[in-house]
Amino acid sequence: MNVDKIRNFCIIAHIDHGKSTLADRMMEITGTVEKREMKSQLLDSMELEREKGITIKLAPVQMNYKGFELNLIDTPGHVDFSYEVSRSLQAVESAILVVDATQGIQAQTLANVYLALEQDLTIIPVINKIDLPAANVEKVTNEIVNLLGCDPSEIIPVSAKTGLNVEKVLEAIIERGKAPKISAETATRALIFDSYFDDYRGVVLYVRVFNGEILKNANIHMMENNTNGIALEVGVLKPKMSPKEGLSDGEVGYIVTNLKTTREAKVGDTVTLQKKPAIEPLPGYKNVLPFVYAGFFPVSNDQYKDLKEAVEKLALSDSALRFEPENSPVLGFGLRIGFLGLLHMDIIRERLEREFNLDLVVTNPSTNYEVVLQNGEEMEIKSASDLPDMSEVLEIREPWVKGEIILPVSMIGNVLNLIVEKRGLHKNISYLEDRAVINFEAPMANLLTDFYDQLKSLTSGYASFNYEISDYRTEDLVRVDFLVGGNKIDALAIMCHKTESDAIGREITKKLKEVIPRQNYEVALQAAIGARIIARETIGAYRKDVTVKIHTGDRDRKAKLLEKQKRGKARMKRFGKIDIPSEAFTVMLKRD
């Protein structure tokens, strides 16, 4: 294919602004998919994606229109997958910016626009859902003009649902979009912008070729990971796999390899040929590390092996997933799993429960901390129970994030109070028409449990939120332990700032009192920092009236029976085992 006739582009938008629907109409108009095979959100193949209405895994598709080869990469919109979005943007020359005519520009739209501008892409602005009664095209046009500084005539109003003006978008890609650049480098280089594991074929790579060509059965080499493989099959996606002899300059396609796990060919890596390898890999590769950790335990210990096998299967196609065995005296054997963010965690939990029929107990999510010991040694801990004795610790560093919230101007006050409550620092406020953009910094741990829910309820669902990890900062952090009947429960331990520890200790002991069932004897619930108790609640005992069978008013007989009951309860307290229900471990996630 002549390189001048190729256009590589992606669609960037906030969640639910209609990018998958726009992709559907494009495939229909270009005849890529026959009418009878068409279904809504065709590129969202996962049941979960279709149900939640979000794109989790990106998908490329090749379309032919008016003699041009158009390669579309449908990208995820959520912040957890922003690294994948950045790799997709590196694989293309233009981007369609889709903005909902009823909602306007949202936080993730802004974040992805900045990523696109960094890559120097041609941005084609599109306003979607203009057929809805609540559409305000004029207002959204002004927002886009303020953001991009473009001419209002360059913005294309469309309805992806009905197909109105979608042809104009395709024509704009051909006219305004740039053809792939061919560099002077002669050695073959291709960028992996996604990879997944196929049970029957091994690891499949989605690549964009920058230099040279990759032919079928070629011996390939992944430069960053230093692994070798064989290109068993190469081809393009239409959207089903369509094999061909090879992929050359500027083309987007897939490579079926003989690799056994996506860890050998990560997103962002450069593919070259073993015979004539490239010297320099393509820029921008980074090893994606998890930031949110949670313990996953099966309700019945018999399912531990099934859980481990299920997570191993998911990890084959998700190179960002990290896990290690964990043992809790209360919950038994389980796994501590690392995720990119809370949405990533929710998706994995739902997939484990649905696809593998597992009943799980998930402990409160926490983040990772950097600990510097008195002897100068540095270590990373993934949960509060891993923290060494405080006498050995010199300092603890926690991750902070840079956040961006877009919301109606009238709601700024409430949100600024929420940021301060979470120990955040607000940096600046800028304005887009009748909405404000708040930039702030805050500790990751404080945003984990319910920041997003509180933000949505404070702003009646109008605010949108986006964040990225900034750096690690030294803070006055302590480990708060929880004792049930005098026994320390490691799985409940949390890390928090010293100034918040008393309030958190009181709040969690109150919640535990509601969840842990009453016993025949009194049970003390305590929160402690080291040996100092900072909060206490008492679960009262069931009281059985043992004097009911005495028909006379003999005080001695009554006292004797009550004394016997007291001794029995003391003995029960010594040997009794308190059953802690699974809800106790997610108590942090539940708010009043």
Image: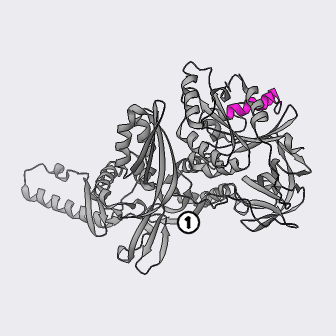
Left or right of 124 in this view: 253: right
In the foreground, 490 or 19 = 19
Q: Which residue is mark 1?
A: 325
Q: Residue 357: percent from the left, percent from the top?
A: 61, 48
Residue 126 belongs to magenta span: no
Q: Residue 513: percent from the left, percent from the top?
A: 31, 51
Name the element at disc 1. strand
Q: Residue shown at 39%/61% (left/top)?
A: 495
Left or right of 66 in this view: 301: left
Res 592 seen here:
no
Q: Residue shown at 24%/64% (left/top)?
A: 570
In the foreground, 530 or 102 = 102
Residue sticking out furthest to the bottom: 375
Q: Quadrant of the C terminus?
A: top left
Figure check: 194 above or below 459: below
* Quadrant in the rendering for residue 111: top right
Figure check: 175 above or below 536: above
* Quadrant in the rendering for residue 567: bottom left
* Quadrant in the rendering for residue 409: top left
Q: Residue shown at 48%/45% (left/top)?
A: 404
Disc 1 residue crowd, few under 14, some 14–19, many 20+, Cα 10 Å: few
Magenta residues span: 20-39
Q: How many numbered marks appear?
A: 1
Kind of residue sitting beneath label 1: Pro
Res 93 seen here:
yes
